Image (cartoon, rainbow, N blue to C red):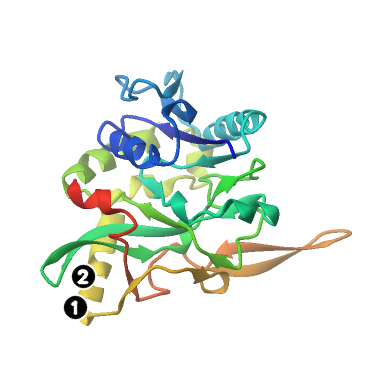
Amino acid sequence: MKKFLLTMQYEEKFLLPIFIKHYSQYFPLNCIYVIDHGSSENFAPEGINRIYIPRDRNFSERDRLQLVSNIAHGLLRYYDYGVYADCDELIALSYLNESEFTNNSVVYVCGFDCYLEELSGKKRILGLVNPGICKPLIFRETPNWNQGFHLSTPHPPQLKLSIPMGHIRYLFLSQIANRVDIRKKVYQSLVSEERDRGVALHWNDGEKELKYFYAHSSMLRQKNTNVSNFNSIERKHLFDEQVSLGIYVKKNFYIPKVSDYKLLETRFDLTDIFPELINY
């Protein structure tokens, strides 16, 4: 099956090469599309499809969502399925069985916030599962994404989430301060209507979220909680089922239990899934 990868980035000088190296395992370079939202220079390697858009207006999550959705929808006219991911989201697509599309036009990944820890004298990539980043990122039809690409209301998560996604926003400590600063500036340029509604507020709380993550992972290390290999995680552990009562029909939809790490104290060893991350 023919597939494409789509991402949107701004000033990801450090992460974009890591992103491209990871996904070039699964995609020819000419099937990777990078939307560059006004970066100061071209970080996309030769062979990548770079779509440049200017950055001379206030940032809008609504506009970003519409742009990505429209491009994804258009590309699906030429490919069998697509993958959308931010530059800090590495999906282990070797875990995808394409027969999954027989029953599901949209497939959710199981999201882990990753960090480096030493176990038995060896560096390991550990991950804490975060329901808030268990997202519908693999699709044969364009998902009906909400802002942030966290949900697609008409498409329920699979009964078991079996495709791991490593969220590497906290993995490279030397890069975090610069990235937090960039995201703060983006938030400050957010259109006032979205800022008043609390859209993308977490972009302004980068230091707070970082401190919380490492305090929590440190607590798990001190408690010596279980370290497991990833297999799959049942939907019921990650999502709450909700019911929407329409005029004529009743619809079920799913929302993440919390965008947090408190649900499961298990630490997952993802080193063998993302071995390249040990070398950075």
Q: Circle 1: is it few (<14), some (14-19), or many (20+) Cα within 10 Å?
A: few
Q: Quadrant of the C terminus?
A: top left
Q: Residue 56 at x, y = what percent?
A: 43, 18
Q: Quadrant of residue 37?
A: top left
For badge 2, the amino acid type reads Ser
- Residue nearest the observer in this picture, 164 or 40: 164
Q: Quadrant of the N terminus?
A: top right
Q: CA distance from mark 2 to mark 1?
A: 6 Å
- Count the marks: how many? 2
The residue drawn where x is 55% and y is 33% is 68
Residue type, numbered disc 1 = Gln
Residue at (21% x, 70% y) in the render: 218
Q: Residue at x 44, y 31 (%)?
A: 28
* Helix, strand or loop status at disc 1: helix
Locate residue 144: give its quadrant: top right
Depth check, front residue: 87 or 273: 273
Q: Which residue is mark 2?
A: 218
Answer whether labels 2 and 1 touch (C-beta < 8 Å): yes
Q: Vertically, is 219 above or below 193?
A: below
Identified at 59% across, 70% down, the residue is 240
x, y percentage for residue 195? 47, 41
Lateral position of residue 163 relative to residue 151, left or right: left
Instruction: Report the residue that reaches farthest toward the left.
Output: 121
Secondary structure at numbered mark 2 = helix
Residue 191 at what x, y percent from top left?
Answer: 49, 32
Position of residue 233 relative to residue 107, above or below, is below
Q: Is residue 208 visible?
A: no
Point out which mark residue 36 bears. Answer: none
